[in-house]
Image: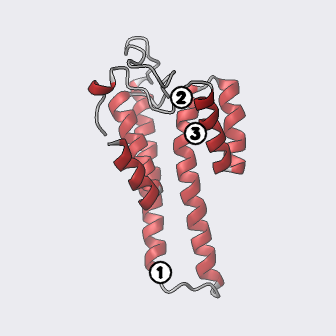
Amino acid sequence: MGTVWSLLTLILGAPFACAYTALHIYRTGSLRFRDFWYAAVDTPPSQEKRLPASTSTLLVVLYAVVGIAFATRLGWTLFTYPLVPLQTEDAEWASEWLLTTVFDIYTVVLCLLGMIFATEPCPSSLFWAVPYITLGGPIGCIYLAQRLFRGRSVALQYGQTDSEAPRL
């Protein structure tokens, strides 16, 4: 099912990244990455660092609102400034699409930042967050690559075996 969510996010954009993130928090109470990629079983739920219910609910609402807000912005931009035909000579058209693209990028950035802050201790999470917010995707890729090179996982934690993990 992860492949489907990945394809939806890749093809249809940030609203699906927010939907997946909100759904994962709702179902598991966490955005933490697994400690190790080869672990068959995650940390038991009693030991897992779950978010308090109120924080979990707040984050689900936040990601849902951000996803819906961006989907609304994207729909408005598509309706008001259609992609076809391209209007590269129209400054207003180009400005609106540039702004929509920036909102798209930062909507996805918000999703990965949630995972970074849920997984890393405070100094380390800030070390990754500031350059990721300012420099974008390459820093996100470096963060994920360094986790893999250190033998850590980029899969989200469920607190149970993979076969018992909820399907999103």
Instruction: Name the disc covering residue 118, or none.
Output: 2
Instruction: Name the disc covering residue 112, or none.
Output: none
In-front residue for pair 107/54: 107
Q: Amino acid at mark 1?
A: Pro
> Percent position (x, y) of residue 36?
51, 22
> Percent position (x, y) of residue 104?
54, 59
- Classify residue 48 as left or right of residue 102: left
> Percent position (x, y) of residue 144?
59, 37
Is 40 placed above or below 66 here? above
Q: Marks 2/3: CA distance? A: 8 Å
- Secondary structure of residue under mark 2: helix
Q: Is residue 82 visible?
A: yes
Q: Quadrant of the C terminus?
A: top left
Is 145 placed above or below 133 here? above
Residue at the disc numbered 1: 82
Q: Amino acid at mark 2?
A: Ala
Instruction: Name the disc covering residue 113, or none.
Output: 3
